């Protein structure tokens, strides 16, 4: 009993330390020294003042356009609505609107820490991705559109950790606890799909996840019924948001997005510059003659995407000594290898399927990021790979008993990554971020 209390107290201290670091970053860093923060803040500012989702030709959007000539408010993303309303409440306490918006993300991460502490000890391993990279902490330290969908997916991890067995014959009864959990999963998945497009792959992963669960218990019919409930509700939420967007923009001319881009974009980002071949070097690299392999051999997409997954700050300007990324990489591969081996050896009928499913969808997540960098805009940034962390969490939640067998190995590895993460965030990020 005393040992459990001591362990939970230590976990609580770690969570508090992470939140303290994030608050320091939020308070000390200057506005727009983080990737695209001003564009996100301008979108959030709209909903601090207004309640309605605007049409593309709405004059109130004039100050929300980015260097690309687009506005985040022309997408389906709902994060700006929720962040704007949160910021309106806390604004009197923090004084500046961008700080209020930043604390929306910190509030979300605080919820994740509370959920982690509520998990049974044998399921806590499902949240290990939150503690092994400072990049996640950094993304939750300033205002952006990436933190919210990541938060939603880890809420789904928390719910998945409560299913035991993971799938069971379904009773369509709101009084049934597992049925209510499925409804929560469906609502969260629907919110994910109207939050960030690079999380669509997570929706496909979730469908495969139900298949893995069905394989694990030998009941594919129950798994299919569970999945149907989740995806029907998620689809309804997505359709409602998409339909409302179509309705709001029903009178907007099809050529308006291109006209807005030509009007508001930076000179070398304008559509006319792209047509003339004088665009920014990172746009439409395939059309400029770059082959897909050259994305790695010349532009080292893989190296920068890995580094920006484990502690790079500002506009990719502040990073640790390169040896840091090598060491944290060694620890990561060792941790992943130990967990994969545990699932294969002790995960029962679904263990191998779980590992293979994770690898396939992690690969698809990486591929979609490389494809975007090649055909649209070069973005070797680890935040686009964050769905992989939630995928790992879902599998660890389902196969926690098998994963726990590796704790004598995985606990020291995760602890070492945690220490390195604190070093990166405090001694590299906080120490050098512009104030």
Image (cartoon, rainbow, N blue to C red):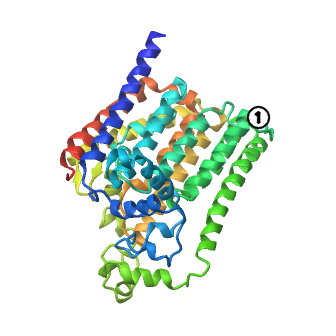
Q: Quadrant of residue 181?
A: top right
Name the residue furthest bottom: 276
Q: Residue furthest top?
A: 2
- Residue beneath label 1, please? 175
Residue shown at the point (65%, 57%) measured from the top left: 237
Q: Which of 286 and 121 is in front in this view?
A: 121
Query: Is residue 330 or residue 105 the one in the foreground?
Result: 105
Q: In which quarter of the image is residue 416?
A: top left
Residue sitting at 60 percent across and 73 percent down?
248
Give the vertical position of 388 relative to 55 (above or below). Answer: above
Residue 4: percent from left, percent from top: 47, 15
Q: Which residue lies furthest to the front in this view?
A: 92
| 29 lies left or right of 269 | left
Q: In which quarter of the image is residue 263?
A: bottom left
Say which of 384 and 91 sits in front: 91
Can you say whether 344 is above or below 199 in the image?
above
Asked if residue 336 shows in the view, the reply is: no
Q: Is residue 36 above or below residue 406?
A: below
Image point (67%, 30%), residue name: 164
Element marked by disc 1: loop
The number of callouts visible is 1
Task: Point out residue 424 in the picture as x, y percentages from the top left corner.
Answer: 26, 42
- Rendering coords of residue 131 (x, y %): 39, 36
Q: Crowding near pointer 1: few (<14 within 10 Å), some, many (20+)?
A: few
In the depicted structure, whether residue 56 falls above or below residue 364: below
Q: Is residue 37 visible?
A: yes
């Amino acid at each position: 009993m005393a040992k459990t209390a001591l362990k939970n107290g230590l976990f609580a201290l770690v969570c508090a330390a992470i939140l303290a670091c994030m608050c320091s970053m939020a308070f000390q860093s200057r506005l727009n020294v983080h990737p695209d923060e001003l564009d996100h803040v301008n979108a959030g500012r709209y909903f601090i003042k207004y309640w309605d989702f605007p049409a593309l030709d709405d004059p109130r959007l004039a100050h929300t356009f980015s260097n690309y000539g687009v506005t985040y408010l022309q997408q389906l993303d709902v994060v700006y609505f929720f962040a704007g309303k949160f910021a309106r409440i806390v604004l009197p306490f923090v004084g500046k609107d961008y700080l209020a918006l930043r604390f929306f993300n910190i509030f979300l991460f605080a919820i994740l820490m509370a959920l982690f502490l509520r998990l049974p000890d044998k399921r806590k391993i499902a949240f290990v991705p939150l503690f092994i990279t400072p990049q996640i902490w950094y993304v939750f330290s300033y205002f952006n559109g990436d933190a919210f969908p990541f938060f939603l997916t880890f809420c789904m991890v928390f719910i998945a950790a409560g299913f035991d067995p993971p799938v069971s014959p379904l009773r369509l009864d709101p009084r049934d606890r597992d049925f209510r959990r499925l409804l929560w999963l469906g609502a969260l998945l629907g919110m994910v799909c109207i939050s960030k497009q690079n999380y669509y792959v997570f929706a496909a992963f979730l469908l495969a996840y139900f298949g893995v669960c069905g394989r694990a218990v030998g009941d594919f019919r129950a798994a299919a019924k569970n999945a149907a409930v989740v995806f029907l509700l998620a689809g309804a939420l997505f359709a409602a948001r998409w339909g409302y967007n179509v309705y709001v923009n029903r009178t907007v001319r099809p050529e308006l997005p291109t006209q807005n881009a030509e009007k508001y974009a930076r000179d070398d980002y304008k559509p006319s510059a792209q047509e003339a071949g004088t665009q920014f070097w990172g746009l439409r690299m395939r059309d400029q003659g770059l082959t897909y392999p050259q994305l790695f051999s010349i532009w080292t997409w893989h190296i920068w995407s890995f580094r920006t997954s484990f502690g790079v700050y500002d506009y990719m300007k502040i990073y640790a000594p390169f040896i840091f990324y090598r060491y944290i990489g060694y620890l990561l591969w060792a941790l992943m290898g130990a967990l994969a081996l545990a699932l294969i050896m002790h995960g029962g009928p679904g263990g191998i399927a779980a590992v293979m499913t994770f690898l396939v969808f992690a690969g698809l997540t990486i591929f979609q990021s490389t494809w975007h960098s090649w055909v649209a805009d070069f973005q070797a940034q680890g935040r686009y790979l964050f769905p992989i962390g939630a995928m790992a969490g879902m599998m660890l939640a389902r196969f926690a008993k098998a994963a726990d067998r590796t704790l004598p190995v995985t606990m020291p590895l995760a602890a070492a990554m945690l220490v390195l993460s604190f070093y990166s965030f405090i001694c590299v990020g906080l120490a050098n971020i512009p104030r």
